[in-house]
Amino acid sequence: MPVYWEDLNWAEFQHRVPAEFNTAIIPVGTIEAHGVGPMGTDNMIPIDLVNNIADELSALVCPPIHYGQVKGLAGYPGSVVVEESTLLAYCTEVFVSIADWGFEHLIVINGHGGNTQTLKRAAWNVHAKTGVKILVVDWWDLAMPACEEVYGQAGGHAGCDENGYVQAIRPDTIHPEMMTDEHVYNFTPGVACYPYPGTVLTYKEGQGAPVFDDEKAKQYREKAIALVLEFCHGALGQWRALGV
């Protein structure tokens, strides 16, 4: 079973970090419109991933960061906006504070593309200041081969990959009966739209829309977890082998 930072008292933490846990892992997401799925999609997925890989990585699970940067979907009801400067400062301070307790590695599992560049900047700031070795993982990029294998196509925002993962863990939050063609917008580079004219965003014409198939959803989730774990294992192993 994963061990959660929040469940430990200070004496337990002092005894177990870094002696037992020299790696910390933290899910980061946001709250925004996701087609006919839940607005918490970008939190649900990285939290589930962390819960399923932490043991294998001997990592202590940090409390999640639930809010992030939202721009193109900020105009849809329920989306919550955090400015880039705020997120950068907040994540930098949180990550530094985590590193200060003696962890050798910090793994950030990101659930939201809008956070990516800011999290990379925060990661560099933290590494430069503390020396902690840090990974920022956009899970959907690592899981792309699984999406192509299971669904036979590329994924998208609130598409077959994200929607499928959530369908596997919280099917009660997916509403296929609400799906219409108007939900889907094929993202066009070079065009700015506020808000996007759709809450399901595809990046290849004719690919990426949700596929409401329970069995495929379960297969996709399992393969996505395996791919993320494989990458993290590999990166940590190489750092250790190189002695850095």
Image: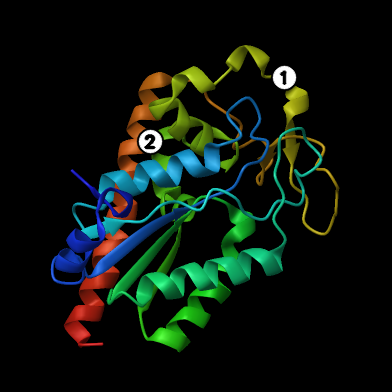
Residue at point 54%, 74% (across, down): 122
Which tag, 1 or 2, sits closer to the chain's start? 1
Q: Which residue is at the front of the view, 131 or 170?
A: 131
Residue at point 39%, 40% (across, down): 149
Left or right of 158 in this view: 109: left
Task: Give the image quarter of residue 195.
Answer: top right
Q: Secondary structure at mark 1?
A: loop
Left or right of 105 in this view: 142: right
Using a 10 Å C-alpha cutoff, classify the residue at mark 2 as few (fewer than 14 neighbours), some (14 to 19) or many (20 or more): many
Query: Which residue has dot 1 on it?
Result: 180
Residue 200 placement (x, y as % from top left):
67, 35
Query: Which residue has dot 2 on it?
Result: 220
Residue 161 placement (x, y as % from top left):
50, 38
Q: Which residue is at the front of the view, 137 or 227?
A: 137
Q: Which residue is at the front of the view, 114 or 152?
A: 114
Amino acid tagged 1: Thr
* Up-down relation of residue 195 to residue 77 (above or below): below
Residue 138 placement (x, y as % from top left):
48, 57
Residue 125 visible from this viewpoint: yes
Using a 10 Å C-alpha cutoff, classify the residue at mark 1 as few (fewer than 14 neighbours), some (14 to 19) or many (20 or more): few
Q: Which image quarter holds the N terminus?
A: top left
Residue 168 is marked as none
Amino acid tagged 2: Tyr
Query: Label 1 vs label 2: CA separation?
Result: 23 Å
Q: Secondary structure at mark 2?
A: helix
Residue 148 visible from this viewpoint: no
Residue at point 26%, 50% (across, down): 53
Count of marks, rendered view: 2
Residues under numbered marks 1 and 2 in contact, where contact means CB atoms less than 8 Å apart: no
